[in-house]
Amino acid sequence: MKRFVDLADFSREQVLELLALARRLESHPEPRALAGKILGLVFFNPSLRTLASFQVAMMRLGGGSFVINPGQGTWQLETRRGVVMNGAAAEHVREGIPVLASYCDALGIRAFAEGKDLQSDLAETAFNSMIGLLDKPVVNLESAVNHPCQALADWKTMDELEVPRDGRFVLSWAYHPRALPLAVPAAAVHMAAMRGMEVVVLRPEGFALPPAIMQRARHAAAASGGSVRETSDRAEALRGAQVLYAKEWGATEHYGDGAADARLRGALTDWCVREDWFAAAPGCHVMHCLPVRRNTAIADEVLDSARSVVQREAYNRLPAQMAVLHQLLRS
Ligand code: CP
């Protein structure tokens, strides 16, 4: 494996092999597997889980890591091509990223969507321009419309919970005071489709996922025997569901227009996941990638119940990423 930037780059069988390796590394630790190897971690945006779990993954495999938060103790890095650099950024990624890569054996990059131009974000313009500078293994720590490490951990979590391969997976929009990126919903819907599940995207009017994201998921479902559809009928979507994956995201039709998005979402505060959502899905698990705003996206009564598996998802980032690093750096 040369890079881990998108689950779609792998066949279903290859993902199952990665998950088997993750389980093996949990039961049979390999504390010297990556001895002498260094992972560079560049975070243009904040993190708790990704930052900590990648550092720990390298330590548990015998390697080391360094972390760069551009602009926080280091030079601010410019990502745009062709700009006159007379602003805050002292260095361009075209110099900075290859320099960092020259110090390590693999580089992870987190660069969220700019949230201004949907087509540019769907094309992963900023992220792709950076990884295009690298001739070393690279890991996507969350880009504009992808979060493959989260998706791999979520797949592992569902396997552990014995969620049937063809079970119903409901990706539900959840309220947040502002528009959040599409990376996690896009990755989650694709992952569940690739797993072979009956995927239902439950969202209020105005919050349909972009057609390109739905089309990609449908393509994955066609190969795995799953299906993908969308609805705004919560009762119908949740009837008999095995998983509700809650996530907040912005309105596609108002992408880049915070005021218009805010007007639309202002009336949707009832899209906070509560226990009474599950009357017809008593065994349904609730997933969320975290961080989550309590009593905004998901109510305390759900997060603090046995229904919530958010801690297990977060823990699974560690073994899933250990498997990714093992594959990238061991050979
Ligand atoms: N789920 C996730 O990626 O968490 P962080 O943003 O804290 O890394």
Image: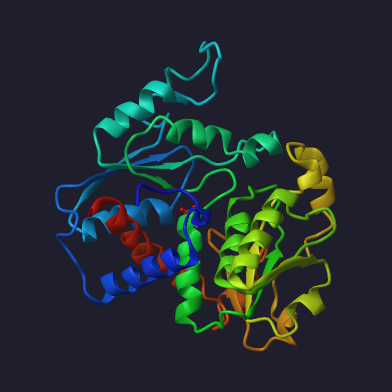
Q: Locate residue 228 relative to residue 110 in the image: left or right.
A: right
Q: Position of residue 231 (x, y in %)?
A: 81, 67
Pick the front one: 197 or 203: 197
Judged left or right of residue 230, residue 314 is left
- The reply, left or right, for residue 92 in relation to residue 61 is right
Q: Please tell me which residue lies in front, 179 or 163.
A: 163
Residue 257 is drawn in which quadrant? top right
Residue 227 point in image, percent of width and height: 69, 70
Is any atom of residue 314 visible in this view?
Answer: no
Give coordinates of residue 100: x percent, y percent. 31, 31
Residue at the front extreme, as displayed = 223
Specify whether 40 is left or right of 3.
Answer: left
Closer to the camera in the image, 307 or 189: 189
Give me the residue at 53% from left, 55% from top.
8
Q: Is residue 105 above or below residue 312?
A: above
x, y percentage for residue 320? Answer: 38, 64
Whether 292 is drawn above or below 27: the answer is: above
Q: Could you say which quadrant of the image residue 187 lies in?
A: bottom right
Taking the spot 83% from the left edge, 66% from the top edge, the residue there is: 232
